[in-house]
Image (cartoon, helix red, strand yellow):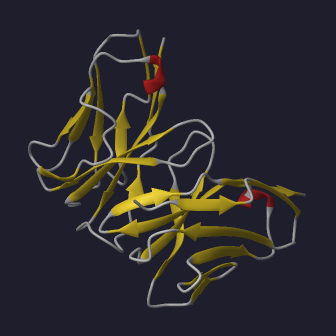
Amino acid sequence: GAGVSQTPSNKVTEKGKYVELRCDPISGHTALYWYRQSLGQGPEFLIYFQGTGAADDSGLPNDRFFAVRPEGSVSTLKIQRTERGDSAVYLCASSLIGGVGETQYFGPGTRLLVL
Amino acid sequence: GENVEQHPSTLSVQEGDSAVIKCTYSDSASNYFPWYKQELGKGPQLIIDIRSNVGEKKDQRIAVTLNKTAKHFSLHITETQPEDSAVYFCAASIEGDMRFGAGTRLTVKP
């Protein structure tokens, strides 16, 4: 594909439920990033993958959040026991190699609403 | 950790005028400073970036300046057009960990 794609585009769930958000990076990009964007705010860093491994997961807010990238391409962000405060747009980005100075290309995001 | 502040939060200009958005950062180790444009319902799109070994960079109507001593950088858009209306984010990066400002909503009035 031409760019980063994310599915679903919108997700509505109930408090306490489990959700999975998917990201398909640009083909050949080894680095993948997850961000969370609340209304009226800039994206907030969650986790950065280099290949299959999480190079930096310091932005994950608590242990209800987990992300995987088992084959070094597609990534899934998993949120357990969702809370209303988890409602936000979850953005995924990818870059060719990763690290400082690499252009990150963003997907359109998944809008998560927890009722 | 890095903290990025961005001003103003909203900016309204007349078509053809210039727009300036300013950001400050806290961590002197930051060495990559991109600017993103975000339109409603879309992900951020890179419009220009600058690295810490450069003081200024220009791309057509868009320019970015960086003052490492003062730890601030600015986006300049000249000859603004209605299609420039969007939310603009600055960011500062260390080792791939990118921190964003809160955004500036730019409105260009025809």
Q: Which residue lies at the image location 37% right of the left edge and 28% below the top edge?
A: A8
State the image coordinates of residue A66 (x, y, percent, origin top left). Answer: 22, 33
Q: Is residue A27 visible?
A: no
Query: Which quadrant: the N terminus of chain B?
Result: bottom left
State the image coordinates of residue A29 (x, y, percent, origin top left). Answer: 23, 60
Q: Which residue lies at the image location 62% right of the left edge and 48% below the top edge?
A: B39
State the image coordinates of residue B65 (x, y, percent, origin top left). Answer: 61, 83
Quadrant of the rendered image containing residue A5? top left
Query: Which quadrant: the C terminus of chain B?
Result: bottom right
Q: Is residue B95 visible?
A: yes
Q: Is residue A62 left or right of residue B54?
A: left
Q: Is residue B61 left or right of residue B19?
A: left
Task: Give the camera-side residue of B3 and B98.
Answer: B3
Count of numbered circles on the image:
0
Task: Give the camera-side residue of A73 and B102.
Answer: B102
Quadrant of the rendered image containing residue B76? bottom right
Q: Which residue lies at the image location 48% right of the left edge and 48% below the top edge?
A: A43
State the image coordinates of residue B55 (x, y, percent, origin top left). Answer: 55, 90
The vertical placement of B44 against B40, above or below, is below
Quadrant of the rendered image containing residue B23? bottom right
The vertical placement of A58 against B72, above or below, is above
Task: Give the camera-side residue of A95 and B103.
Answer: B103
